Amino acid sequence: MPRDEIQVSGRVTIFDVAEASGVSYGTVSRVINNEPHVRETTRKRVMDAIDRLGFVINRQAQSLARGQTHVIGVLVPDLGTGYIGEIIRGIDDELDHAGFDLMLFTTHRRAAKESNYVASLVQGVVEGLVLVLPRNPADYLGVLSSRNFPHVLVDHQGVDTTSPAIGTTNWQGAFLATEHLINLGHNHIAFITGTMDLGCAQDRLDGYKAALSMHHIPQIPELIFEGDFFQNSGVAAANALLDLAVPPSAIFASNDVMAMGAMDVIRHRGLRIPDDISIVGFDDIPQSAMVFPPLTTVRQPLEQMGRVATQVLLAMLKNPETKNSRQELPTQLVVRSSTCNYKDRAG
Amino acid sequence: MPRDEIQVSGRVTIFDVAEASGVSYGTVSRVINNEPHVRETTRKRVMDAIDRLGFVINRQAQSLARGQTHVIGVLVPDLGTGYIGEIIRGIDDELDHAGFDLMLFTTHRRAAKESNYVASLVQGVVEGLVLVLPRNPADYLGVLSSRNFPHVLVDHQGVDTTSPAIGTTNWQGAFLATEHLINLGHNHIAFITGTMDLGCAQDRLDGYKAALSMHHIPQIPELIFEGDFFQNSGVAAANALLDLAVPPSAIFASNDVMAMGAMDVIRHRGLRIPDDISIVGFDDIPQSAMVFPPLTTVRQPLEQMGRVATQVLLAMLKNPETKNSRQELPTQLVVRSSTCNYKDRAG
DNA sequence: TCCATTGATGTGAGCGCTTACAAAATGGAG
DNA sequence: CTCCATTTTGTAAGCGCTCACATCAATGGA
C-alpha cells in the first residue's frame, strides 16, 4: 500500500532496482557506476528499471561505503558585498566541473564560529576546505595542517606559512595605482590603509610607499590614514584628510568600499570628483563601475582566485603529495572617471 | 604504524572510543547523543577518550543510520549583486540555529542546471530545498510537489500555486513609491518594468498604475518602458524616456540596478539628480546607499525573507502536514536623495 | 531476604551502497 | 564436443553509526 511513499524520500534502493530488473544488486551497482563488465542487454534492462522506479542514488550511503563525500566546504565571513560572491562563483564553477558539491559556511565575522566549524567539519562530510578571507586563521590552521587536512586559503597572505594560499599581487596593484596618480601630476597623495593585521593591507601600503619613493616624492605621515576596510573608516579618513592644512589632491583607498565612503564626504563638502580631488580604490567590486563617477580602481581577479584555489585543492585531494602551492594572481589597474590630471583640476 | 594516519581522515570511530574507555560502542553512541541513561562516571570516561583520541562523529554514517542528513539545499541563480547574498544571510543564520548545514547550488542563470540539480538532489543528501529567485520553476516544481519534497520559494510569486513561497508586497511598495513621487508634485512619472514574466514585475507595474489612477493621473503608455532587471535596460530606458517630446520629471525603476543605469544616462546628458529629474529604485541593495546621490528606493526585507522561508521549510520538515504557507513580507519606502519636490527642480 | 523496578550497559541488525572474491555463463580453439 | 580463458553475474562483508531489544546491576519496599 505505501507504494506511493516509496517515492517520497529516496526509498527506492538498488535492491528494488535489482528485483525489478531481475539481476543482483551488485550488477545494479555496476550499471550505476558505469563499470565495464556488464552485458549491454543487462545494462539496458537495469537502466529501464531505474527510470521506471525513479531510482536516485543515495549519496550518503555511497559516501560511507566509498569513504569519500565529494563535498568541499567553503568558509566565508559574509556574502554582503558581492566581493566574496565573485570568489564563490569561481569556486563553484570549478567544483561543478569536477563533480563536487559545495557546502557553504559563513561566520558572519564571528571569529568563534570559524574555529568551531573547522574543528567539526574536518572529519565527516567535507573532504576539503576553501577558506575565504579567514579572519583568525591562527586558531585552526594548525589543526588543519597537522591533521593533514586538505585546505587552501584565498586572499590571505598573513602570518601563516604552511598552508597553500591564493592571493593577488597587492603590492604591485598599489604601486601601479599610485604611479597612475603620480603620472597624472599628483604629488600630494593620501592613502587609506586597511586592517593592518592583514597581510594584504600591509602589502598595499608598501606598494604605495614604494611608488612614492620611486618617484622621489616624500612620504608625509599625515597623508596616511589607518582604516579598517569598512565604509565608515573611509568617511572618517576623508574628513581628517580634508581638514589638513594642505589637503591631498588625490586619495587612494585600500578598498573600494572605503573609497566610496570618501567620495561621499568629498561631495558633501561641495568638492567635485575628480576635478577637485581624484579617488582610487582597490578590489573592483561590482558596484564600483556603477557609482558616480565610476571608480578608478585596482581589479582583483576575484573569480579567478576562487577558480585557482579550487584547482589547487582538488589537486591536493587527488594527490596528497602535492606540494603546497602559494600563488599570487596579477592585479590590474582599471582607469575610470574618478581620477584626472592634476593640472586639469578646477580648484 | 599508521597510528598517525588514524587522525588523517576521521578514522577514529566509536569503536575506538569504546575500546579506549572500556565500554561498548552503544554506550559511546549514547554519550555522543546526550542520551539520559548513562552513568555520570561512564559519561566522563567516554568524553575523555573522545578528547584524547580526537574523535569526531562521521556525519555520513549518522545520516545514513538516522535517515536524515540535516542538510538543506539552497538553489540560487547567482551571487553577484549582493541581493541574493542578503537572502542567504537570513537562510544561513536560521539554519545555523536549527543545527542544519547549508549546501549551496548556483545555476548561474543556466536554466538547464536548475532542473538537473533539483532532480538529483531531491533524494539523498538534501532534506529540503530553498529556491531563491527560481527562473524556470515550472520544470521541476511539479516533481517536487508530487514527490512531496519539502521546499519553499523565495521571491517568486509566479504561475505556480501549490508550493509554499515567501515574497514581498511588491504591489504596495510600488504604490508607495509612486505616491511618494506624486506627493512631491510629479505628474509625469515614467516606469521601467522588470522581466514581465515574473510575478513581482507585474505586481510592481500594477502598483505604479494603481497609484496613478488613485490620484487621477492619466497613464501615458510612452512613459512605461519594458526592462529586464539588468543595468543595460535601465540605460536603454532612460535614453528612450529622455528623448520623448515631453520627458518625465521622475523615473521609477523596477529595481535598483536599472535605476543606476538610468542615473548614469541622466548624468551623461548633463542633467542633475534630483534637481532635473527624480529617480526611485526598488530592492534597496547594499550599494544603493552608496551611489550618488543615495537612491530613494523600496526596501525589500531580504534577510528577513530568507529567514522566514527557512522557518517555513523547517516547520514542514518537522511536521509534513504543515499547511503550505505563502507569505508576503512588507516592503518599505526608503527616501534618500534621488528624489525631490517637483517645484524645486532647477530645470 | 527476596522480588520487582528502574537504570545502565551490551548486542544484533540494518541504513544503502561498494568492493573484493567466488561462481556461473559464454565463446573460441582444439 | 570438450576444455580453458574470458566475460558476466552473484554474494559476503563492511563503511560508521543508530535504535530496539536483551541483559545485567542496583535499588527499595514487603
Image (spheres, coloured by chain):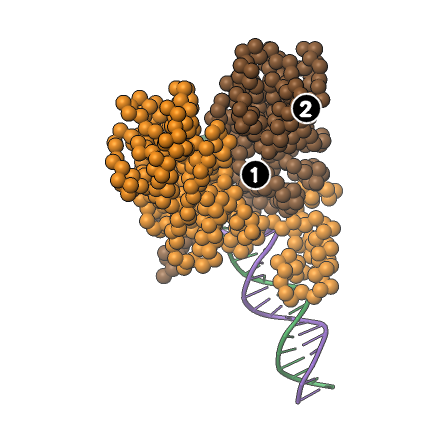
Chain colours: A brown, B orange, C green, D purple
Q: Residue at x 43, y 35 (%)?
A: B296
Q: Residues within 10 Å of mark 2 (few under 14, many from 20)?
A: many
Residue A49 lies left or right of residue C17; in this view the side is: left
For label 2, the residue is A224
The reply to whether the C-beta atoms of the residues labelled 2 and 1 are less than 8 Å apart is no
Residue C28 lies left or right of residue A206; in this view the side is: left
Observer-nearest residue: B18 or C11?
A: B18
Which of the 4 image quadrants contains residue D30?
A: bottom right
Q: Residue at x 66, y 45 (%)?
A: A112
Residue A188 % position (x, y): 65, 16
Q: Amino acid at mark 2?
A: Ile
Residue A114 % position (x, y): 64, 42
Reading the chain from its start, which is encountered first: label 2 or label 1?
Answer: 1
Q: Residue at x 36, y 39 (%)?
A: B183
Quadrant assignment for the N terminus of chain A: bottom left
Q: Residue at x 64, y 27 (%)?
A: A240
- The subunit letter for the residue under badge 2 reads A
The outermost residue toward the front is B343
Which of the 4 image quadrants contains residue B324?
A: bottom left
Seen in the picture, residue A3 relative to A306 is either above or below; the reply is below
Q: Mark 2 or 1, which is nearer the eye?
A: 2
Observer-nearest residue: B56 or A209?
A: A209
- The subunit letter for the residue under badge 1 reads A
Q: Residues within 10 Å of mark 1 (few under 14, many from 20)?
A: many
Residue B224 % position (x, y): 29, 31
For label 1, the residue is A78
